[in-house]
Image (spheres, rainbow, N blue to C red):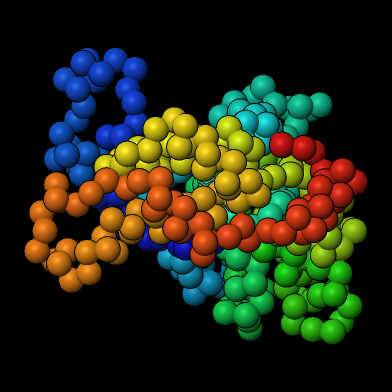
Amino acid sequence: SSEGKGPNSRTTQKQKGKERQRPREEPILADVTTPSDDSEDSAAEAVRNAWKEKTAHLLKNLPTGIDEGAAKQILNEIVVQGDEVHWSDIAGLDIAKKSLKEAVVYPFLRPDLFMGLREPARGMLLFGPPGTGKTMLARAVATESKSTFFSISASSLTSKYLGESEKLVRALFTLAKALAPSIIFVDEIDSLLSARSGSGEHETTRRIKTEFLIQWSDLQRAAAGREQSEKEKERGDASRVLVLAATNLPWAIDEAARRRFVRRQYIPLPEDETRGTQLRTLLGHQKHSLDDADIQKLVQLTDGFSGSDITALAKDAAMGPLRSLGEALLHMSMDQIRPIQFEDFEASLVNIRPSVSKQGLKEFEDWAKAFGERG
Ligand code: ADP
C-alpha cells in the first residue's frame, strides 16, 4: 500500500503543508525562527546531494556477487524518501507505537544502551485487517528513528521482479547494511513466507524465499556481534537493520518463518475514540458544520470500519457539497460552496461499508490470542 518515491520528492507541497499544520510548542518564537521556503529548499538540496554522493560511492564499491543493476533498482524504486509520516499522523494505536519505540526507535538512536540482554529483535511482524495503519506505522518508525526506509511488497518480488528477485534480495540486504540504520519493510509478507511457497509448487518462489531467509539469518548472525568480521563491519552496521513485515493473512505464514519474528504485533481495527480522532483530523482543514454530537453519531455508525474505510468515507462525504452543483461548480467561488454536513456522511454511508466482516475480525483476534502481542 505504499509506493517508492525518488529522492526528488523531498520537498513536495504536500509535505510543506503538513509541516505547517503541525502545532508548534512556541508559536511566536517558532514563527520568527522558521526558515523561509528558500532555505528549506536549499537544505533539501543539500540532503539530495549528500545522498547522491553516498550512493554513487556505494555503487562503485559494491561487494562481489552484488549486481549493480539490482542495486540501482533498489535505490531508485525501493528506497522511500520524502513525504515523511510522523507518529502524530497516525490516529490511536498507542500500544503498537510504544512497542515499536522500544523495539526499534530507541535501539536505533542509542545502540550503546541496547546491547547484550537488551539486544533488539531483528524482525517484527505487524498483522491485522487491511487498512489499519501498518504501512503508516512502518514509515513513522523509519522517520522517527532517522533510518533509511526500504519498502517492497513481497508479491512484487514474486511477480514484477521475478527472474531478478534473488539478485534483488541480495542487493537489498547489502544496501540496508551499508545505509544503516535501515528498516526493510516487506508488505504482504505472507506471499513470500507462506507454507505453500516452500512446498516446491513454485520453484522460483521457493528460491526467493530461501535467499530471503539466508540473508536475514546472516544479518542476525552478524548483528550478534562477535562474528561480524572487520571486513563485514566496513560494509555496514548489521546491528541496525530491521526487517519489519506486514500481513493481512498471518495464518498463511509457515511456522518456521513465523518463529523468526520474535515480536508479532496485532494492529486492530480502530476503537471508538480513535475513529473520533481520525474523523476530526480529516475534517480539520475543511469547511464543515458537524458539531461534537454529530461526530459522536458518526463514531457509532462507523463501528467496524478500518482507518482506510474512515478515510474513504470522509473523502466521499467531502464530495457531497459539490455533487449537487453539477456543472455549475465550474463557475462558483470557494466561499459559495456550502460546508460539508452530517447528511453528506449519511449519504456516503450507504455506499462505503466496512471492508472487514465480523467473521474475518474473529480470525484475527484468534490468531492474535495464539501468537501475537495485543495493541
Ligand atoms: P495497512 O498497511 O494496514 O493496510 P495503511 O497504513 O496503508 O494500512 O493505511 C491506508 C490508509 O488508511 C492510510 O493512508 C490512511 O489514510 C488511512 N489510515 C489507516 N489507519 C490509520 C490511522 N490509524 N490513522 C490515520 N489514518 C489511517
Left/right of residue 86 with respect to residue 15 in the rendered view: right
Q: Nearer the viewer, residue 16 or 105?
A: 16
Residue 179 in picture, x, y percent from top left: 52, 49
Q: Residue at x 46, y 62 (%)?
A: 4
Camera sees residue 17: no
Residue at 72 percent of width and 51 percent of height: 127
Q: Residue at x 37, y 60 (%)?
A: 6
Residue 256: image quadrant is bottom right
Whether residue 154 is visible here, answered yes or no, is yes
Q: Going by the image, does 123 lie left or right of 16? A: right
> Left or right: where does residue 31 sit relative to residue 298?
left
The quarter of the displayed image where residue 275 is located: top right
Count of numbered labels shown in the rendering = 0
Rendered position, 17 above or below 150: above
Is 128 situated above or below 193?
above
Query: Could you tell whether 182 is left or right of 88 in the image?
Result: right
The N terminus: image quadrant? bottom right
x, y percent for residue 41: 20, 44
Residue placed most toward the observer, 232 or 204:
204
Q: Quadrant of residue 363?
A: bottom right
Of residues 296 and 63, which is closer to you in this image? 296
Residue at x 22%, y 39% (from the top left corner): 40
The quarter in which the C terminus is drawn is top right
Q: Position of residue 362 (x, y in %)?
A: 81, 52
Indicate whether 112 appears above or below 178.
above
